Amino acid sequence: MKNSLWKLPFLVVMMVLTHFSAWAEVTIQSSQKVSSEWDNGYLLDVEVDNNTSEAISNWKVTFTLAGTQKIENLWNAQYIATNGNITAKNESWNGSLQPGQKTTFGMQISGSGTRELINLKAFSDDGSTNPTDPTDPTDPTDPTEPLIIALSPTVQVISTWEGGKQVLLELINPSDSTVNRWMAEFDLLEGDTITGLCGGEFTVSNNHVKITSPIWAEGGTVTPNGKVTLSIILKGQSSSSIPFSNIVASGNPISNVEVPTAPELNPILNDDKDGNYNVSWKPVSGATRYILQQSTSSTFSNPITILSENILEKGFQGQAAGTYYYRVAAVGQSLTGPYSVIQSVTIQTSPMPIGIPVLNEIVNPDLDGNYKVSWSAVENATGYILEESTKGDFSSLIEVYNGSDTHKDFSFKSSGQYYYRVRAKNSSQLGNVSNVIAVIVNIPTPPNSNRKIVGYFPNWAMYRAQPFYAKDINANLVTHINYAFAPVDTNGNIRLFDPWSDTGFYTPGS
């Protein structure tokens, strides 16, 4: 592994705190191109071309933005805005252009509207020393502070291998102001390409790299003497210990951007102290989303970010017992404001009581042994237990059902009186018993068990003028059935047919 450390000299790209000098306006050529775009913003390059026959020592570009757009960041030029008119002026190091020579500056723009600059014009300076230019309405007044702050880049090659290397790029804020929406750009050496970058978003055009702070980095805020560290993977055969050229970096001073105020977090209503409640807050002007944090400590020593969205309420269901603390902050223009006053909610330790089912009347008019026992569903129940007894006081009982259904079917019960009751259950509780419902079963007894009563049914009886079917036989007086050509299926139907005809004829057997 090879290690080398290259610290670039401090790059003076800070806006000069003097008004723009006078311009003897000689129009030169300019063009624009969108280099990258996303839902609510884009990157745009402006090319300034000295298409005259004379060298120029300074240039400026004027334009306006469409719709609600605004400049989030601008590099390789100084700029100010007056009444919606924007004027960009060359830096000290890129103002001189020979005939036919070009230079480029770029910007990051957010907001809605056409993605192009309106009334884009470029002008040269002929060297006039006239201290004022009252006829130019777009000339700015003296700015009170720099619109960008230079960041000092430090580059370190931390690892090399055949055909590539890993580079750490640090952007240090040497100023006394916090900056946000930082950017850096540089030129790759011949033959090198970027195959990976961690800590920022980048674009490459003709070996020229632009890196901007990612959206998820809360605006790329860098405090005084703070820094941003980027990890870059380069592929290529260059052996230079200085992996980049023409590197510049800058950021916006925080004072130029309005930081959102703290939202007002509403009191949390949860009178029944169950685990279901809502946390809500008042909107903040200019906020594009909100960060809601939860903690089990009033000092937020263990915060959890619950949401980061543009909503004003979050619902909670089934929270475990305990006390929870909440705070919310607004985010606008990629800047996070202060957190709100803390609100708390306490969840009770005892579980919600389980309900008592109601046992329905049992319908069994024929007193046979086939009937259904059913009951009502109750809240907080995951299952039910049905108990049966032949005694009304349930001094002896059996459990005949344990499951999640709300009914139980019975078949072929013997004669007698049966009592039923049911109770609900869940993972932690067994509810109280329901009301009791009884049912009587009375199966007829043959008149003389020593004798056989035989019923005989000829199938041709169905063809009489008044048809006679097997179901017309009084079953209470029959103990056996003698039949021919009459298979009985599982549903109790008898298939009756002549061996030579009517083979598909069915009739109920009872």
Image (cartoon, rainbow, N blue to C red):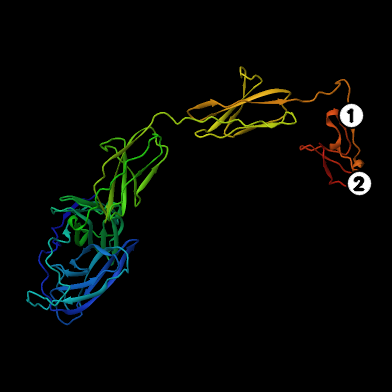
Q: Nearer the viewer, mark 2 or mark 1?
A: 1
Q: Secondary structure at mark 1?
A: strand
Q: Are marks 2 and 1 in contact (CB under 8 Å)?
A: no
Q: Residue furthest top?
A: 395
Question: At numbered mark 2, what does the secondary structure look like: helix, strand or loop?
Answer: loop
Q: Which residue is mark 2?
A: 500
Q: Is residue 241 left or right of residue 394?
A: left
Identify whether 225 is placed above or below 250.
above
* Residue at point 27%, 48% (across, down): 263
Depth check: 379 or 337 in front?
Answer: 379
Whichever of labels 2 and 1 marks the residue nearer the N terminus, that label is: 1
Residue closer to the observer: 298 or 356: 356
Q: Is residue 109 above or below residue 376?
A: below
Task: Give coordinates of residue 82: x percent, y percent.
Answer: 18, 68
Q: CA distance from mark 2 to mark 1?
A: 27 Å
**How packed is label 1: few (under 14 Cα within 10 Å), some, or many (20 or more)?**
few
Percent from the top left, x then y, of residue 176? 13, 52
Amino acid found under the numbered disc labelled 2: Trp
Answer left or right for 63 relative to 323: left
In percent of width and height, residue 225 lies at 15, 50
Mark identifier at residue 454: 1
Residue 2, given in percent of the width and then of the height, sits at 22, 50
Looking at the rendered structure, the kind of residue marked 1 is: Val
